[in-house]
Amino acid sequence: MTPQRRQLAVLVAVLVAAVIVVALVLVLPGDGDSSPKASPTTTSATSAQPTPTPTPSPTVKAELVSSMDVKVSGDFGKKPKLTVPDDDPSKKLLLQIVSEGDGPAVVAGQTTVLDYLGQTWKPKKGKANVFDNSFDRKTPSVFVAGSPDLIAGWNAAVVGLKVGSRALVSIPPKFGYGAKKEEGKELSGETLLFVIDIHAAYAPDATADGAEVAPTVEGLPEVESKSGQKPKITSIEGASADGDKPRSGLLIEGTGEKIDPARKLVFQVVETKPGSTEISGDTWTQGGPQVVDASQILQMAKALIGQRVGSRAVVVVMPPSQEATGTTPTSPSGPVSLVVDIIGQV
């Protein structure tokens, strides 16, 4: 959820050029644009950037309750609707397990793939005040559980939830955006309700894990690639894109479920600077696993078509022009090399 749009600028440009529109490193777009409306970060709903030096969220524990008199309609994975009583909200941090999954519990530091809906307890102009939700965006959100950039109430709810669970959390102002109402901070002084659906959780160093294979395609960079280990691009000698189209080859054959182009993939990627082996983007060190439509990533890495989760592919692509991306031209010129690990599917 912390928008770190500049940390992987070239990578984002490359993926966009390959028809991949992906918000890397916890970016939460709102209503179809690139500006977050509100999310469980330590910033207010009207700010799109985290504080330069975020203060760690205080360690708190939510009180587990069987009910908080808030009705949650809808099944796991579907957009919920909340019916909130007219009573004043509790001043306690409350957690209700609406439906419990059978997966492992989320651990602090893991990248969680989830959907959520956020709503203030009090209505706004007589109507439910849903300030943000991922369900309408049709793409799960990606958060690092326990991050100091997240409000304390959110961390207290997510850490420990089992994968596959739907939970409702009521967050009083002191564990949200502050008890004092502040101008320009829409959610300050408000008790917040979040419905959270946990789809998956991954360690920040998660990698492809399958059978190592030698790529059969020429014109690819040399990659130090071992199953279960982060890849390293060691040489780009002879590497070239297929004209203005990406060139790709398989490095690891996964053993998980078959990649479905209609679903979304959880992936890691490392990227070099143009014409170099120097790394310019790396999700392993810059935010952890991310989520994108499978159909989009398969357009760039065709070697992954028909493969399974746990696969790894190397890709060579020409970076987009300055006019296409609105960014400063990269130097030196040349193809960009990427290695993509598919570690999950949601």
Image (cartoon, helix red, strand yellow):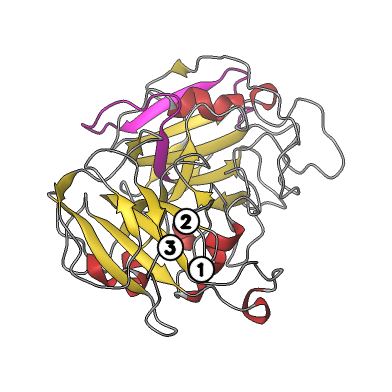
Given the image, on which type of amino acid does mark 2 rest?
A: Glu
What residue do we see at 67% from left, 59% from top? 35
Q: CA distance from mark 1 to mark 3?
A: 10 Å
Residue annotated with mark 3: 337
CB atoms at circles 1 and 2 under 8 Å apart?
yes
Which is more N-terminal, label 3 or label 2? 2
What residue do we see at 79% from left, 41% from top? 185
From which residue to which does the magenta span run? 85-114
Residue annotated with mark 1: 14
| In the rendered image, the vertical position of residue 103 relative to residue 230, given as above or below | above
Residue 214 in sight from this viewpoint: yes
On the image, the x and y values in percent for residue 263 come to: 28, 62
Given the image, on which type of amino acid does mark 1 rest?
A: Val
Residue annotated with mark 2: 271
CB atoms at circles 2 and 3 under 8 Å apart?
yes
Disc 3 is placed on an element classified as: strand
Toward the right, the furthest residue is 183
What residue do we see at 62% from left, 50% from top? 7
On the image, the x and y values in percent for residue 14 come to: 51, 68
Which disc is residue 344 wearing?
none
